[in-house]
Amino acid sequence: MTQDEEQGFSTRAVRAGQQRSTEQEHSEPIYATSSFVFESAAQAAARFSETEPGNIYSRFINPTVRTFQDRLASLEGGEACVATASGMSAILSTCMALLKTGDHIVAPAGMFGSTISLFNNVLTRFGVQTSFVPLTDFEAWEQAIRPETRMLFLETPTNPLMEVADIAALAELAHRHDALLVVDNCFCTPALQQPLKLGADIVVHSATKYIDGQGRCIGGAVVGDAQRVGKDVFGFLRTAGPTMSPFNAWVFSRGLETLSLRMRAHSENAMAIAQWLREQPGVARVFYPGLSDHPQHELAKRQQRAFGGIVSFELEGGRDEAWRLVDALQTVSITGNLGDVKSTITHPSTTTHARNTPEQRAAAGITEGLLRMSVGLEEVDDLMRDLERGLAAARGK
Ligand SMILES: *Cc1c(COP(=O)(O)O)cnc(C)c1O
């Protein structure tokens, strides 16, 4: 790992974590095996008691999964990574491993809908409460902290309104109160932003999105230090089993190889679409941190290498206009996923955030006229022509 760290990002994206087998394969193989054999009863005992390192059982150790974990840990600058079955299980595993009954979380009101549901509907049943605050209101974060606050959790930029949080400032706040800062780095990926280097303690990922990048597999990851992630989160996964499959890990490792290139291209296309959308009739607001009048534009410029591939926009009008736009599109796909080479569009209030209460949606700023577009790698001219068709339909033309 020390040697790894000396190499540049792109080199590590392609090379880190590979351990060639005696077959001398060039490309990483898929170890499709649930368990591993031992040379003797004594070796089996030594492996299980962890007095001898090595493979045991793929619920918690698999060489293909380990390659993905080591590669992502290297790219995020973490000591350890635990791959999980999904992004949500990465968040759940982090909470189950590091929190206990009576603990308290502070998190932004505007974030991924399932994360809000997990905190509100699941963790509360285990006696873990969450206070929700406006992401960019530092004083609100400070005031929400209680003696029992153990975790500040955020995603930046947020889904779907693309608000940007000051990671370094919130890390300092968390540490002053003996709490952890956990950052969901799904929208930026380590190619654009490395929260651990800004002071965050833990990074969680939905690998489903940009790390895969081609919309094939569901997966997640937790990255951080050797104790909390390498021992505590790993220990939870080993026992509870929200494990990533070797096949998915292989796909995600390949995804990491092209991540930097793709993130740059997604960001360029999204910037072009955001600037263009702003000039279009029927568009009330465009949410993209790359726009110079975005409230956290300067912060995003400091904190991120580029602005990412997600553009949200609000139509003049409500749900009817938004649905008419979506239904008129011929190239952009109507689907909930994001981070794909194919552009996708969703109507958050009736899809990703439909299971949140109207109050939660209002607090998150999710109106009926809001659309979230994940800008893919098609030609931008083709995307603009498609959106033009949608905007005309929204206006009843
Ligand atoms: C999709 C998403 C998740 C959840 O990931 P899954 O892989 O779908 O479980 C978490 N956070 C953010 C920001 C997401 O976009």
Image (spheres, helix red, strand yellow):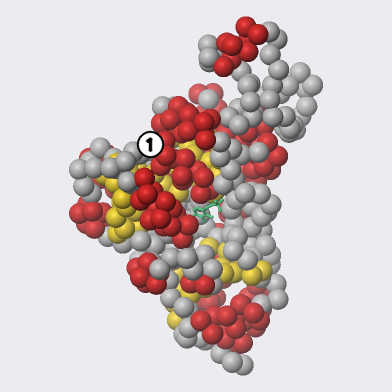
- Residue 103's spot in the image, x, y percent? 29, 43
Q: Secondary structure at mark 1?
A: helix
Q: Quadrant of residue 65?
A: top right
Q: Residue at x 66, y 77 (%)?
A: 329
Question: What x and y, as percent, mark residue 124?
Answer: 35, 51
Q: Is residue 200 left or right of residue 6?
A: left
Q: Quadrant of the C terminus?
A: bottom right
373 w.r.t. 66: above or below: below
* Total numbered labels: 1
Percent coordinates x, y for residue 68 in the rendering? 61, 35
Residue labelled with disc 1:
98
Up-down: is 339 above or below 260? Answer: below
Of 28 and 12, nearer the camera is: 28
Task: Please tell me which residue is depicted at 41% across the width and 47% down the height of the picture.
Answer: 183
Neighbour class for label 1 at 10 Å: few (<14), some, many (≥20)? some
The answer to whether residue 293 is visible is no
